[in-house]
Image (cartoon, rainbow, N blue to C red):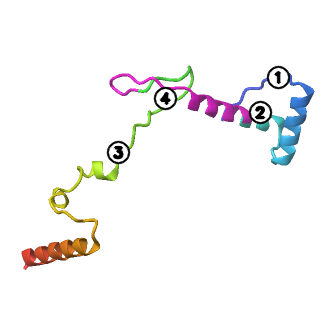
Amino acid sequence: MQVTKLSISLSQSLLAFVEDYQHNHAFSSHSQVIEKALELLREQELKATHIQVDDTTQPQNVAIGCEPTIPTQAQETILQRMGGMPKHLLSTGGLSDRETRQALIAERIQARYQARS
């Protein structure tokens, strides 16, 4: 990773915080503490920013120099991905009753076994 040297001015209280943080979290330099703080700030900013997406679902850059982010879409439920409620279950009533479910499962297993024979 290429780095660029930057000079910054901090108040005494912020400098004391950076030094304490460096010592308590085993960072080897002030620069690492500042870099960590900036990464967290960038992450917070990206979470707060709503990414604009056009009709073709191509993501727009949040800011110049940022990597494009793929928008997250609402996840479908497993039932939706599998095509909805199975029709054979909709035609059978009383599935909340355990004995009814057991009888239905046994009937389906027997029908499959007989179809293979």
CB contact under 8 Å: marks 1 and 2: yes
Place of residue 47 in the rendered image (x, y in percent of width and height, measured from the top left): 57, 32
Measure the alpha-carbon separation of dots 3 and 1: 48 Å
Q: Which residue is mark 4?
A: 68
Measure the alpha-carbon separation of dots 1 and 4: 29 Å
> The residue under label 3 is which amino acid type?
Glu
Measure the alpha-carbon separation of dots 3 and 4: 24 Å
Q: Is residue 26 inside the magenta stretch?
A: no
Place of residue 99 in the rendered image (x, y in percent of width and height, measured from the top left): 25, 75
Q: Secondary structure at mark 3?
A: loop
**Pointer 2 local density, CA inside 10 Å: few below 14, some 14–19, many at least 20:** few
Q: Which residue is mark 1?
A: 8
Establish if 29 lies above or below 45.
Answer: below
What range is drawn magenta here? 37-58
Q: Which residue is mark 2?
A: 34
- Among the two numbered marks 3 and 4 on one chain, the one whose residue lies closer to the N terminus: 4
- Among the two numbered marks 1 and 2 on one chain, the one whose residue lies closer to the N terminus: 1
